[in-house]
Amino acid sequence: MAFRRKKISVIGAGQVGATCALMLASRGVGDVALLDINQGAAKGKALDILQTAAVQLFDSQVTGTADYADTADSHVVVITAGSPRRPGLTRDDLLTINARVVASCCREIKKFSPEAVVIVVTNPLDAMCFVAQRELGFQRERVLGMAGILDSARFRTFVALELGVSVRDVQALVMGGHGDSMVPMPRRCFVGGVPLTELLAPERVEVLVERARGGGDEIVKLLETGSAFYAPAASVVQMVEAILRDQRRVLPCAAMLHGEFGVNGLFIGVPCVLGGRGLEKVCEMELDAAERAAFEHSVSRVRALVDDLARLGL
Ligand code: APR
């Protein structure tokens, strides 16, 4: 059988979606269909990205569309459609708008790409994963949320800046929900194999933890007109690559838990093995008392969001 490039559809051609499309194409991860309700934006950005191939030298095809038929038989679908956080938009407003958008996208994805692995990016992430899973009805291996890689990337960046070392050598794990209740785990952060807790005083570590927790807000305040998109897109690309190249990377992702870490039926950020089937495995481990308390608090916040979906009839 002739070799064909894998197909990735990115739903939402806004800041995150278009950046994902650019990074996926330029890394040659696969052919990209970029879909938006705003057809002009999808087609225009896709064409612009495709024209970078002549200079950056890649073979991936990039097409823009407003028609889900063009996304048919995707191997991976990334959902970035929705509204970003904006001043004046309440949490409930955002939850309502984005739950409706994600549900409508998933109905089409289910129809056109029933075998796809779906990666949700739209916020509030953990609740949007829940909505996606409900609409798709796929087994849990094929519905994942992107948050932990981004949150860990932020923490790793602040550690590297603080210590004046290469971020490549900083390993970190952030678990829990995506939001200010996330759980960075300093005890599990290593700098070239040396525990962070042996390199920095606890007060400094706490400053970095807090900055990571507020990492999204810090950028929203600076941008004033939207939220972060370069690092979110790069984090999505790492997940897509791990799946399509069957890399079996161990990465923190939002996954539907079936009893792991004592949680059932919620999407929570946990260390996952990502490979050709999507979620290959959730890596369980013992949490100490402080980690457990922070994790459970974060889980309760995610549960409250899912309860809000029901309260709002979503
Ligand atoms: N179907 C397809 N596309 C849609 C739909 C829909 N039903 N509703 C909105 N969109 C598109 C918009 O037209 C817009 O182009 O989604 C895109 C969103 O892009 P931006 O407003 O630029 O938002 P972005 O910064 O990309 O963030 C998208 O990712 O990180 C999260 O919190 C962020 O939830 C937000 C999402």
Image: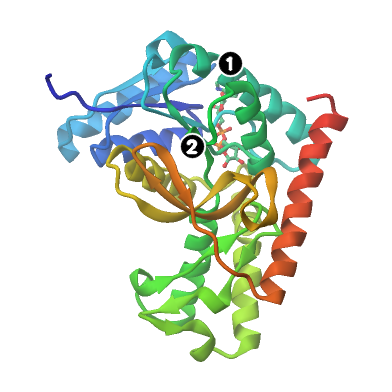
Residue placed at 71% from the left, 75% from the top? 290
- Quadrant location of ligand 1? top right
Secondary structure category for the residue under label 1: helix
Q: Which image quarter is the N terminus in?
A: top left
> What amino acid is found at the position of numbered circle 1 in the picture?
Arg
On the image, the x and y values in percent for residue 297 come to 77, 60
Say which quarter of the image contains residue 65.
top left
Q: Which image quarter is the C terminus in?
A: top right
Between 259 and 1, which is closer to the camera in this rendering?
Answer: 259
Horizontally, residue 230 falls left or right of residue 298, namely: left
Mark earlier in primary sequence (2, 1): 1
In the image, residue 168 sits, relative to residue 44, either above or below, namely below
Kindly identify which numbered label has been placed on residue 64: none
Q: Would you call the spot at circle 1 few (<14 residues within 10 Å), some (14-19), or many (20 or more)?
A: some
On the image, the x and y values in percent for residue 143 come to 52, 34
* Dots 2, 1 in contact, CB < 8 A: no
In the image, residue 190 sits, relative to residue 215, either above or below, namely below
Residue placed at 53% from the left, 67% from the top? 155
On the image, the x and y values in percent for residue 283 come to 49, 57
Say which quarter of the image contains residue 276.
top left
Q: Which residue is mark 1?
A: 107
Secondary structure category for the residue under label 2: helix
Between 273 and 69, which is closer to the camera in this rendering?
Answer: 273
In the image, residue 292 sits, relative to residue 250, either above or below, namely below
Q: Can you tell which of label 2 and label 1 is closer to the viewer?
A: 2
Q: Which residue is mark 2?
A: 141
Q: How many marks?
A: 2
Residue 116 visible here:
yes
Residue 38 visible here:
no
On the image, the x and y values in percent for residue 248 come to 34, 50
